[in-house]
Amino acid sequence: MNMEHPQGRLVVVSNRLPVVLEQNAHHGWRAKPGSGGLVTALLPVLRDRGGMWIGWPGTSVEDPDGIKTALDSASKDAGYTLHSVPLNKEEVHKFYQGFSNEIIWPLFHDLQSHCSFDPSYWRTYIEVNRRYAETVARHSREHDFVWVHDYHLIHVASELRQLNVHTQLAFFLHIPFPSLDIFTKLPWRFQLLRALLEYDLVGFQTLRDRRNFIQCARTLLDDVTVQGKGQVVTMHAGGRTLRLGSFPISIDYNAFMKHAASPEIAALASDLRTRLPNRQLILGVDRLDYTKGIPERLEAFRNALLRYPDLLERVRLVQVVVPSREDIPQYSELKTRIERLVGEINGQFTRPSGWVPIHYVFRSLTRSELLAYYRAAEIALVTPLKDGMNLVAKEFCACSIEEESVLILSEFAGAAAQLQNGALLVNPYDRDGVADAIYTAFGLPPAARRTRMRRLRRTIREHDIFWWVDSFLRAAIAKDLSAFPLPPDYVPQDSFTETVS
Ligand code: GDG
């Protein structure tokens, strides 16, 4: 057990439980423990000192006994306890789709025109956050360390304090924190800001997110002071003292690397490559989401084909779009827009030789298929309009076993702060700039590719998901914050390169 971590049990709270629930006509509900990066990283801590995970099981079907039995049995396999917070259909609509995904998600990604500021969403958000807090209060004890995740649950600490829970509470925001001008558009800006102050530690993905938060607090609240300037600082505000840190989330680098190097993935990747003789594979992998900049990327790709005819028949863009949040109207409109653009571009450039510039996949890939694409691709095009971090960029590098591929990365992905020394950084709105980067990547000699990719892989290997969990937990209790200097390769995203085309 790491003595530099908080010593009580770990209580993880997230919107969704890390399980997949299935209903079977004969055996009722079954819950399969999840296998995402966060679970993998937290598992050793949860098993070491005991702990639990609290969240919504992902179904609005009301069968509390059936679901509890399934979660109890999954808990035995998982090595930690799963507790569910049931949500009915209206709560899913107003708390999850509404306040979380039609207000905070677009606003925090700088897209206030996508927000629907319905006051009833706010009321349900508070009620549901209260329910999560009650579940935490029911199951936790005095010295537990409660770690709440993400924008769905900002209010949990505030509710817990009202329930007289005084254990250590920490929060990590997986998405960006917006600048003052954008944050102040939120009708509930004071409430949300004060709610964050109720935690003892608040973690952001990047220094820029933390700086935005501090600026909002300084402007909206009285008597705010901040001490320190490293990865973790101390803030005094609203009569409370808390720590604020920048913890860029990461991946299980070794697991990705080893799986990508396996004979299974090597064979799948080589199969993909033989279907593209003499061509470079450019890969885009994104959830269906307007923050990911998919139409902008397709336009930039079209621009590249128009401006650089050398690329014709020499590249293929594989764009994987994973279905997500299709119940929200803007997401189904986005799907239609992407499909229209793919059709247009393919119609415009397809050659009699059989070359089709874009291969479009609209489904979730298996992990093996995804890794085969990562390993086979020469270029990854990761161009979100704004992203908390972007794990696809890191996974692609980890799987680039031959180290001969190129990452083109948006300046507005949190990952750019760590990866700018090896990636080709672009402004995703700049169609000429992205087209130039595609052409540069296409022509980059193997030695230059290797130098860049090695730098990227080293950074990700040294700052993997286990480093992330460890630094977060240590930041919660460290006596001396000078033990958290900024990593040397971690540069705030304050400088932008002028591209002249
Ligand atoms: C949020 C923040 C932040 C994708 N397609 C398939 C698939 N994936 C997996 C990837 C990756 C994950 O989904 C996507 O993670 P991202 O980080 O890229 O993006 P969000 O889903 O928006 O995540 C983001 C993250 O939280 C963590 O803090 O980085 O900024 O928005 O792991 O591998 N997995 C499979 N098939 C697919 O087709 N199996």
Image: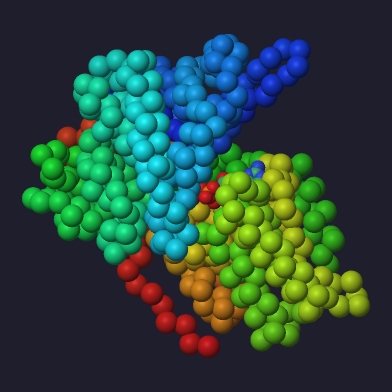
Q: Can residue 146 be seen in this snapshot?
A: yes
360 or 60, nearer to the observer: 60
Quadrant of the image containing the N terminus = top left
On screen, residue 281 above or below 26 = below
On screen, residue 447 above or below 204 = below
> Where residue 272 appears, x then y in whole percent?
80, 56
Q: Report the residue at 86% width, 78% height from top.
A: 351
Q: Can residue 232 be seen in this snapshot?
A: no
Q: Report the residue at 38% width, 25% height from top.
A: 131
**Is 443 left, or right, of 464 in this rendering?**
right
Q: How many marks?
A: 0
**Is 119 left, or right, of 35 in this rendering?**
left
464 or 31, nearer to the observer: 31
**Is 123 left, or right, of 292 in this rendering?**
left
Q: Report the residue at 36% width, 38% height from top.
A: 123
> Where residue 428 appears, x then y in whole percent?
52, 71
> Where residue 366 appears, x then y in whole percent?
71, 42
Residue lying furthest left in this view?
Answer: 223
Coloring scheme used: rainbow
Q: Report the residue at 32% width, 19% height from top.
A: 137
> Where residue 76 appears, x then y in whole percent?
55, 12
On screen, residue 21 above or below 314 = above
